[in-house]
Amino acid sequence: MRTFFASESCKETELNSINPQSWLQVERGKLSKISFESNSSIESLIKVPEPSILPYFKPVDYVEVLARLHEELEACSSQERSNLYLLQYQVFKGLGEVKLRRTSLHSAWIKASSVYERLVFGAWLKYEKQGEELISDLMSSCGKCAKEFGMIDVASELPASSNLFSSGTIVDNGKAVSGQVSFRIGNERILCDRQKIAGLSAPFHAMFNGCFTESSLEEIDMSENNISPLGMRAISEFSVAGCLNEVPPNLLLEILVFANKFCCERLKDSCDRKLASLVSSRQDAVELMEYALEENSPVLAASCFQVFLHELPESLNDSQVVKLLCNSNREQRSIMVGSAAFSLYYLLGEVSLNLDPRSDRTVCILEQLVDSAETTQQKMVAYHQLGCVRLLRKEYNKAEQLFQAALEAGHIYSVVGLARINHIKGNKQWAYEKLSSVISSHSPLGWMYQERSLYCEGERRWEDLEKATEFDPTLVYPYMYRAASLMRKQDAQAALSEINRILGFKLALECLELRFCFYLALEDYQSAICDIQAILTLAPHYRMFDGRVAASQLRTLVREHVENWTTADCWLQLYDKWSSVDDIGSLSVIYQMLESDAAKGVLYFRQSLLLLRLNCPEAAMRSLQLARQHASSDHERLVYEGWILYDTGHCAEGLWKAEESISLQRSFEAFFLKAYALADSCLDPSCSSVVVALLDEALKCPSDRLRKGQALNNLGSVYVDCGKLDAAADCYINALKIRHTRAHQGLARVHFLRNDKNAAYEEMTKLIEKARNNASAYEKRSEYCERELAKADLEMVTRLDPLRVYPYRYRAAVLMDNHQTKEAIAELSRAIAFKADLHLLHLRAAFHEHVGNVMGALRDCRAALSVDPNHQEMLEFHSRVNSREP
């Protein structure tokens, strides 16, 4: 959803749209030339879209919100828990914390207080885990069941109402009448037990035992009550037996309508449950939901509703389903989903936004979300989301009203929507002043400066974008704008350096696309093909230039201008790039190798390792599944299945797969997997010898030097943990001989443990010089030098990768040691503003406690427990500080 909400305004901030045909034509194997001397040529190629308006909840102080939520969760009733976890989910969604938001969803599901909440959050988790169906199958192959979000028996979860009518509650009038009554329907008569029918409902009891004429009649005409003779016989049988046996669906519907009309609650409940048991397809659900809503049948409604949810996202492409969901009023929503309406429409809104944010369906669902919102928090989120969609559809007046409502409810981020709309309407100065007002009245955040930069020019814009990066270095737009501006000034090296800053720690597709354009402008086709192949690895169907050109098409054209590599060339290139820790370059080489006849399973596996290193877990899992799909043997397939299970938290099952693979054939990868999984899962120190033996076995099996280097590196780590420093050093040196560059870090550790800090520092310096991605190397080197050098290394780490938290903690600790309390807290706050990290929050809480700020300590402690509710040290800290709360 990153690019869904780009604004239509501020066109002067964008470079001219390209005409792909002007340079995509291939004549005699040549791309059309792009003159670097011509600004117009560069501008026709490069475009920097405006930053997106995210349809998320983005509080100005998320720590305060998380802390309040934790406090409320401690004190609330069970009925309130799921809604609070949903709000927590929204906070983490706005922060881009995928794992944390899924944890919140899981908590909402676990703590669900009704079947409706269980259905909504179970379907939500199932939707979030799309593409992970294979994991359930693999767990089943290990004898484990992982299908936790399957269909449930709704009827058993919804007990019959305790208000069902009992004839014993109404006094008999004592009239002496026949015990039988005959109901005439057309030409047929159905003989019934008068008192049994009277016992079905208060109206029937009054009819037969009260002052009504029917109380003395032996035959009553029911022809005008839309009940057939068959239906009436079934009702008569129910009045005696108390159950409906072998009644066809159409007759059940007829009886349901009759039961509702005459307030026969037991009969209605029986029909409701019987019909619910017959819902087996989406079409069944569509047809029966209308009856369920009209006749107020909660069991049937929930059963139909469950089918719609279970089939997401496909069910939202069904116009009948959408009509039912979008046209329901408050009463009907209550029948369908109880008190979970807001949760339901928030889920449906997310699904529809992902399918097509501009669609009428998305608008209708989000209108239902607004109508379902009850709390201030829910209203601000609903208004903001619908405002984003209205803006996307260029419905500016409606969008403005919604953003204003969200802002008035307290969602400051919605000012972004108001600013864009006012600029579109020609009121650029208002937009600038509005953002300035927000900046001056709140703790400034990166997005505030980023947004204000759109409404000013020259140095003021540049300064605002520098401020945006200072407050939130994860925002990609400032880097892209600065890089494009430098490219316009024909400072290509500075432009590349600027875009490389963000790509060094955040593999954003739009940044790779921009750098690809730079390389095209420079006619550096080898670098261009590298970036586009990395793009296609991450997103095989990616389209460039506002979605107008398939990346795969561009690759085909650019490839005409680069040298073709043989398989041997590719392996040499991969070995070189892997050794220099050039992960993007390695991805590109593997992409090219996959087009050859090489063993694809092995290549996809290597690809997955790189993607994990680049913090792209979803793409890594896709590559692992492709490795399994292309495995050349059963024992190879089992290894990839083991890694799939291990990477999704099923360590024991991954270990089992490794053992099964070894039983078929001894291989490097099987032994390596077993050693890795065992080292991770076994806390017993005696396991170390087993891990060593397994890695030794792995090294005896055939493999390439890239993997052998990794095994030697891992073996060295085990020896270090066992205190066998000589053996560890031998492993690291042997790994370095085959150019496993990361072994420098292990060898540095050995030097340090031998009390040779200078040698450790020098070893890490070698790694820094060799590795293209070296932020972690600078961080590690800081441990082996004096304070001033360490501070310099950690400043470099923050420049290279501002998401690494250790440098902030170190600098804050140094400041605290120097009694610079405010500066220490400010250093931590700088990182906390854009990264919800347990350790940062923990340290800041400790600092607050140290200076006697109990409320600040408690706030950070509670926020940290929202990140990890089971962190033992934080729980103890919370207990201690909470006891001191004023």
Image (cartoon, helix red, strand yellow):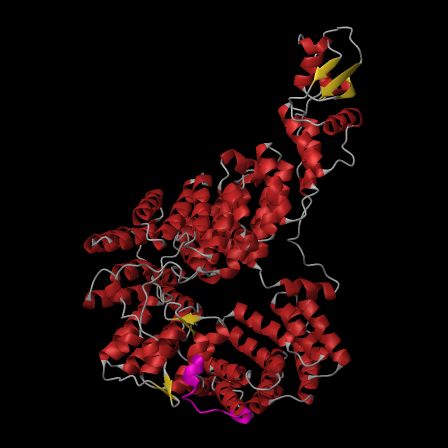
* Image coordinates for residue 547, horizontal then vertical, percent: 40, 68
Classify residue 593 as left or right of residue 677.
left
Q: Residue at x 63, y 27 (%)?
A: 260
Q: How many marks?
A: 0
Residue 808 image-quadrant placement: bottom left
Please tell me which residue lies in front, 481 or 883.
481
Residue 63 visible in the current orientation: yes
* Image coordinates for residue 612, horizontal then vertical, percent: 53, 73
Classify residue 257 as left or right of residue 231.
left
Classify residue 94 as left or right of residue 209.
left
**Magenta residues (range):** 555-569
Q: Residue at x 52, y 77 (%)?
A: 610
Classify 783 as above or below 111: below
Please tell me which residue lies in front, 200 or 840.
200
Q: Residue at x 77, y 31 (%)?
A: 243
Residue 689 visible in the current orientation: no
- Where's the N terminus, which quadrant? bottom left
- Where's the C terminus, which quadrant? top left
Classify 177 as above or below 747: above
* Image coordinates for residue 129, horizontal then vertical, percent: 58, 60
Residue 566 falls inside the magenta stretch = yes
Q: Residue at x 57, y 70 (%)?
A: 621
* Image coordinates for residue 824, horizontal then vertical, percent: 36, 62
Please tell me which residue lies in front, 138 or 249.
249
